[in-house]
Image: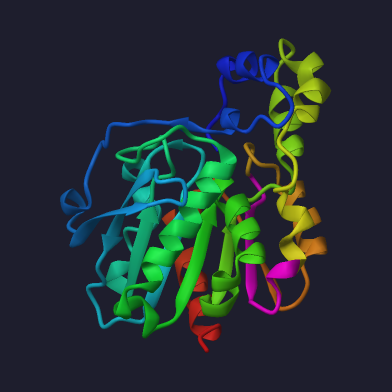
Amino acid sequence: MKNLLPAFFLLMISCTSGCSGIFFFPQKQHLQTPEQLGLEYEDIFFTSADETRVHGWWLQAKAPLRGTIYFLHGNAENISTHIHNVAWLPARGYQVFLIDYRGFGLSGGKATLPGALQDIQAGFEYLLTRTDSREKPLYLLGQSLGASMAIYFAATDPLAKQYLNAVISDAAFPRYSDMARHVSGQSWLTWPLQYPVSWSMIKGYDPVDHVADIAPLPLLLIHSQDDRIVPHAFNDELLQAAIVPKNFFETRGPHTATFSNAQNRDYFLDYLARTRK
């Protein structure tokens, strides 16, 4: 998640029960393309369940294909600013499919949590139509808000349970109300809003209530000791609620900076290799 601004809380005050759009800070303009990073790619468009047009990038593997990564980014900007988290994977033999939820980048519609989850499901269904993704192992990787949505999706979608080899969650939070309360407690201006804000959060999608249902799929939870956006302690509740097969990888450094570290990349690749069927 981005370091949320006071405008976040002005939106929160106006929210009615079940609000979710305040978790999204989309940007329409792309700041770079995969080609500028030396990557071969395809522009992909598909339609979500409610006919919203959704855009993504398919990054082609440079080395002999080892598998496919379905990547879900965090709450702000768009895939052009999150691509650096996965741009290194094609050279290591993994093709990557990354999408912009509705309201982000070239995707249509307005960002909401239920809508984003529809987009994630539709993107996964598109992914399964490709023979190059069905022939090799398939992994779901989410970061921050994307990690929290990934947990819910993997736990509740029958196709995800059937076709995924593993789920990797980087810096997820257990409850939307917890995240809203934590952020509003960071400033004396918004401190009194902690509980009203948390009570207004959408219900039914909290990762902690669903993470156990990911099993028997392998689950890797990643979280940094130094994360100031999504506190490290939030991971403890998710780890306790998850059931085996589960692993935890503790890192150091800022929020969602996991793959800027070569040792973290090596651990991640080793985990993928260990969870191939």
Quick check: 36 left or right of 13?
left
Q: Can you name the residue that lies furthest to the top here?
A: 189
The image shows residue 9, relative to residue 148, as above or below, that is above
Q: Nearer the viewer, residue 167 or 201?
A: 201
The image shows residue 184, relative to residue 239, as above or below, that is above
Q: Can you name the residue that lies furthest to the front here?
A: 50
Region rendered in magenta: 213-226
The image shows residue 262, relative to residue 171, as above or below, that is below
Residue 254 visible in the displayed image: no
> To which quarter of the image does residue 193 belong?
top right
What quarter of the picture does the N terminus occupy? Answer: top right
Q: Nearer the viewer, residue 277 or 156?
A: 156
Residue 146 visible in the displayed image: yes
Quick check: 180 left or right of 139?
right
The image shows residue 94, relative to residue 136, as above or below, that is above
* 182 falls in the magenta region: no
Q: Nearer the viewer, residue 25 or 63?
A: 25
* 217 falls in the magenta region: yes
Q: How many marks?
A: 0
> To which quarter of the image does residue 60 belong?
bottom left
Q: Residue 28 appears at what percent x and percent y? A: 32, 31
Q: Residue at x 65, y 57 (%)?
A: 152
Q: Residue 215 appears at what percent x and percent y? A: 71, 75
Q: Residue at x 29, y 39 (%)?
A: 106
Name the image colouring: rainbow
Q: Residue 70 appears at what percent x and percent y? A: 43, 63
Q: Residue at x 78, y 72 (%)?
A: 243
Q: Residue at x 68, y 69 (%)?
A: 214
Q: Residue 126 appears at what percent x and percent y? A: 37, 64
